[in-house]
Amino acid sequence: MAISGCDTIDLAKKYGTPLYVMSEDEIRRVCGSYVASFQKFYHGNGRPIYASKAFCCKEMCRIVLSEGLDLEVVSGGELFTALQAGVPGQNIHFQGNNKTIPELELAVDNNVGDIVVDNLSELEKLERVAACKGKVVHISLRIKPGIDAHTHEFIRTGQIDSKFGLDLASGEAFCAVKRALELEHIKLMGLHCHIGSQIMEKEPFVHAAEVMLGLMSQIKTELGVTLDFLNLGGGFGIHYKETDDFIPYIEYMEAVSIKIHEKCTELQLDLPKIFIEPGRSVAGEAGITLYTVGGIREIPDVRSYVAIDGGMFENPRYALYQSDYTCLIANKANQPAGYTATVAGKCCESGDLIQEHTKIQTPEEGDILAVLSTGAYNYSMASNYNRNPRPACVMVRNGEGRVIIRGETYQDLIRNDL
């Protein structure tokens, strides 16, 4: 098995396992397709924004910036990473439902181009921070459009019952718009929504665009204010299993653009700048994780456990969401996948599993197991549970690999202990 021209067995030997591997070729291809879609459907009036929570490190920030994307961050740590990678503040969009005062100060000090205000309390905090620093900050407001996307309950965010955003149905969102327009150190530039993640349908995105443009029209009609942009968030689904009902991203983009142009004409609105925030769809399928197979425990008439040298500490998504993955033995990739395995991690938890009852090639101790589509929300959600060091990440391109995140050592684990 190879990725971007690199033999996965050679990568495992050179860098050890567990090992995150990211294809720069695939990342750049997807970024390029999103940029091209904005030229096609909006004549360049807007741009994609990489949602860095999917996979955040300095090199990833540099790559997406070089491809013409802005960057979305959701914490002071992600913001600091982006700034250290050389991303200009004006190209950063700062999300989050409970930004702290130090985080807001970091954003204001570095002239972040769009602070996405999540609630009325945050709006007042940001006004005080901006006033203390003698600045006027550009913001957008995160709106709950009342759309319940068909996805896992933990990653639905657009419905009324959500910790994120200002509620549209109750009038809270419109009150926030009016308050933002009153504040001396706040300049309201646009609106934002995000309805969820790993969505495999076009209709929720189309409906979200329709609802949000209706709010923009209300703001123009009742308050005489024309907002500059509409950010429709991300959430586009990717392939985890061959059976996933995958929709090409260009179809999402086209369907939403048709509705936006129709609705703007109907409402007599000038076309706003359009932003979207792909994260998983940029990083997810670009990444794989390599493991070394350890013990194999076959329990007759029950299941067969195939142990690996990683687990929920570097990929918690199965434990959290029962996420589907495709697994295979990399050094036997051309052989039939006829063995039913439960892939088990090394953590001291019965629920430390990567996949259950999945078909792989017949495993042996020492084989290299590859788990596909792990580029998003794996390194980002990794921990040191059981004091396991987080693995290294290698970026591969055109048959060459380079380390972009060093693997942690045991010394790293005690660095902050007193």
Image (cartoon, grey):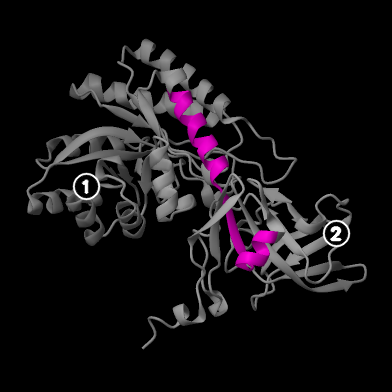
Where does label 1 land, which residue? 123
SS class of the residue under badge 1?
Answer: helix
Instruction: Please give left or right for residue 211 compared with residue 339 in the image.
Output: left
Instruction: Please give left or right for residue 237 compared with residue 271 in the image.
Output: right
Q: Measured from the top left, where is residue 223 in percent x and y?
A: 19, 24
For the residue marked with disc 1, what is the amino acid?
Answer: Leu
269 is higher (above) or lower (below) than 252:
above
Residue at x 52% of width, y 65% of height: 382
Residue 14 is one of the magenta-drawn residues: yes
Give the dominant element type of the magenta stretch: helix, strand or loop. helix
Q: Residues in magenta?
A: 10-38
Q: Is residue 172 visible?
A: no
Q: Quadrant of residue 146?
A: top left
* Distance from the alpha carbon under mark 1 to that under mark 2: 53 Å
Residue at x 57% of width, y 54% of height: 401
128, 237: nearer the viewer: 237
Q: Residues within 10 Å of mark 1 (few under 14, many from 20)?
A: many
Q: Measured from the top left, where is residue 58 in percent x and y?
A: 40, 54
**Which-is-in-front pick, marks 1 and 2?**
2
Instruction: Please give left or right for residue 207 compared with residue 116 in the image.
Output: right
Residue at x 43% of width, y 13% of height: 262
Residue at the outermost right position: 300
For the residue marked with disc 2, what is the amino acid?
Answer: Thr
Q: Residues within 10 Å of mark 2 (few under 14, many from 20)?
A: some
Residue at the outermost bottom position: 418
Where does label 2 land, which residue? 340
